[in-house]
């Protein structure tokens, strides 16, 4: 089941890349000097992407754990 561990690690890294992308997007939005309402409007889709990236990362970690337990 070594292949399952590597697939899980790749999926986790993809999720981590998404989380880092969200961090960069939030830093850019905060640095733009927007008003409170405009900042909230810009953050709304970023929050959804952040939750999706976190879910992908968790799925990858679960694949790694299953691969370790089966291997």
Image (cartoon, rainbow, N blue to C red):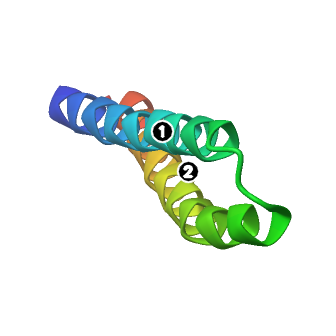
Q: Is residue 57 above or below residue 5?
A: below
Q: Quadrant of residue 36?
A: bottom right
Mark 1 sits on what residue? 61
Does residue 51 appear left or right of residue 70 in this picture?
right
Label 2: few (<14), some (14–19) or many (≥20) C-alpha neighbours in 10 Å: some
Q: Nearer the viewer, residue 40 or 47?
A: 40
Q: Position of residue 11 (x, y in %)?
A: 31, 42
Instruction: Please tell me whether mark 2 sits on a helix, a strand or a loop.
Output: helix
* Image point (56%, 55%), residue name: 50
Q: Position of residue 25 (x, y in %)?
A: 51, 44
Q: Is residue 2 above or below residue 42?
A: above
Q: Nearer the viewer, mark 1 or mark 2?
A: 2
Q: Position of residue 47 (x, y in %)?
A: 63, 62
Q: Nearer the viewer, residue 62 or 35?
A: 35
> Considering only order in the chain, which callout, 2 or 1, is on the residue closer to the N terminus?
2
* Image point (62%, 35%), residue name: 27
Q: In which quadrant of the rendered image does the C terminus lie?
A: top left
Does residue 36 appear left or right of residue 18 in this picture?
right
Q: Position of residue 2 (x, y in %)?
A: 20, 26
Question: How far separated are the C-alphas under marks 1 and 2?
Answer: 11 Å
Q: Is residue 56 above or below residue 26?
A: below
Mark 2 sits on what residue? 54
Does residue 28 appear left or right of residue 31 in this picture?
left
Q: Which mark is residue 53?
A: none
């Amino acid at each position: 089941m070594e292949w399952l561990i590597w697939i899980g690690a790749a999926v986790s890294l993809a999720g981590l890349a998404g989380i880092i992308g969200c961090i960069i997007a939030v830093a850019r939005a905060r640095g733009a000097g927007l008003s409170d309402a405009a900042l909230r409007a810009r953050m709304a889709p970023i929050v959804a992407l952040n939750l999706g990236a976190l879910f992908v990362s968790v799925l990858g970690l679960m694949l790694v754990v299953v691969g370790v337990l089966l291997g």
